[in-house]
Amino acid sequence: MTRDAPALPVKKREILGWAMYDFANSSYTTVVVTFVYSAFFVNYIVPPELAHLKNTFWSIAVALSTTLAIILAPFVGVLCDFSGKKKKYLAWCTLASIVGTSGLFFVNPGQVGLGLLFLVISNTGWMLSESFIASFLPELASPKNMGKVSGIGWGIGYIGGLLSLLLMFRIITSSAQLHLAAYINENQLAMIFIALFYALGALPTFLLVKERAVAQPGFADADLTTLLKAGTGRILAMKSLVLEYPILFRFFIAFMVYSAGISVVVKFFGIYAQDEIGITGSDLVLIGATLQISSMVGAIGFGYLEDKLGSKGTILLSLAWWLLGIIGIYSLTPLAELFGLSQEHMFTVLAFIAGSALGATQSASRALVGLLAKPKDSALLFGLWGTFGRFAIIIGMTFGPISDLLGRHTALLFIMVYFIIGALMLMAVPIHQALRSTVSDL
């Protein structure tokens, strides 16, 4: 089997079904992690007497779930490759995220421990599912259209994020200042709706996408014990995998560094907008909607551009775009005065600029892994891609304590360092050499 001639013909409805998973799980990261629940958690679940640690608590939730994903992603990826049952493991990860998200409904102000528990469960499931849905990409796209297909998926994902934010706009209608009890109830109820959104949005993936993964010889009907032993052996032989994919692992390192900057933006955007700029309630949701639209445009637009520039060139261009957006946010006050805009409106413009890079960077990175991974190792390598992405989150979560110590505005400078170093490292990776080698092996 090769990427250009898969065993089963790929139909457009399958690509749509695959992209619908991006649509579904974007609701979680958009509402829970980035815009709505993150700000609600640090300001209303964390009690006033612990307010000086609110960013640290959020960082703990992210770091714990990330650590679990780091441990589990390569291992479950190996099980997928050996058993040929990607959809089965994807379903379990999806269920864990949905159940954890629903659990946030029961978290009341002051119950930080319970909130952390459900955040860790939901975010771990979401992170694992992100890696495993990506592992279907090499089976559904050819090297010629890999960037476009990945970009379409990520673009549709942002439509899901946008619609989930608009749903929040209808559910969270009370003002925290005027009707605090109602505001808290609405934020809790919102988590039930997001869990339902995630579940219903993911159904087309399981109904339309065919299981093309082939079990490795002798493992088609293997029991779990046999799979666990084989998976453990494969992971322990990681040195041979690195030797087989040396350039891909160099890319993973660069990806980890620049993704640390992205993780800060994703995890703290809503908190920054609310606490630093003073954007709250429906205005915060509208800012989030703006970011989703720009990210969708960037993912699809850069996706078509990627098939001409190549994944590496597209990522480097998007990182330059990131730097422009972060510099703009750091210089928000003088820029607002220069253009005669309020800080809120200027922030909206800058969010649009930064958002267009968000989808482009992530989509192009996913496509590059799809180009370099051999079919027999796709789930494992995408699991490792996710693992390096999770290491990036842990690195990025140093932003929490740093911002508590120095202030969020000053801490923005640390984000720029991640993008610059990551870009320099990526420039040194001979991607074209790896692509020629991969094609010759197929």
Image (cartoon, grey):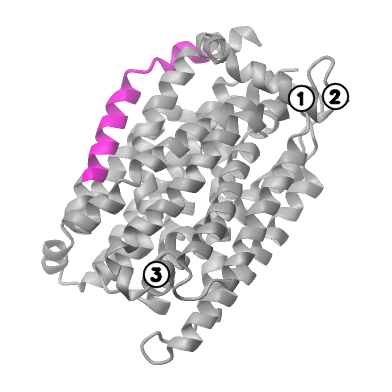
Whether the magenta-drawn stretch holds residue 57 is answered as no
Q: Is residue 93 visible?
A: yes
**Label whose residue precedes the other's in the sequence (1 or 2):** 2
- Label 2 neighbour load within 10 Å: few <14, some 14-19, many 20+: few
Mark carried by residue 227: 1
**117 sits left or right of 75 in the view:** left
The reply to whether callout 1 and callout 2 are in contact (CB within 8 Å) is: yes
Q: Neighbour class for label 3 at 10 Å: few (<14), some, many (≥20)?
A: many
Instruction: Look at label 3 and name its amino acid.
Output: Val
Q: Earlier in the sequence, mark 2 or mark 3?
A: 3
Most frequent secondary structure within the magenta stretch: helix
> Residue 180 placed where, x, y %?
43, 87
Residue 384 on image: x %, y % = 54, 28
Provide the residue designation for mark 3.
46
Work out whether residue 181 or residue 108 is closer to the camera in this orientation and state it.
108
Check disc 1 and give the amino acid type.
Answer: Leu
Three-letter code, disc 2 = Ala
Distance CA(mark 1)–CA(mark 2) = 6 Å
Q: Which residues are magenta?
A: 414-435
Which quadrant: the N terminus? top right
Residue 4 visible in the snapshot: no
Residue displayed at 78% across by 33% down: 85
Task: Decide which of tag 3 and tag 1 comes sooner along the chain.
Answer: 3
| Residue at image point 37% right, 72% down | 43
Up-down: is 399 above or below 347? above
* Badge nearest the viewer, 2 or 3: 3
Q: Quadrant of the C terminus?
A: top right
Mark 2, residue position: 222
Quadrant of residue 323 within the rendered picture: top left
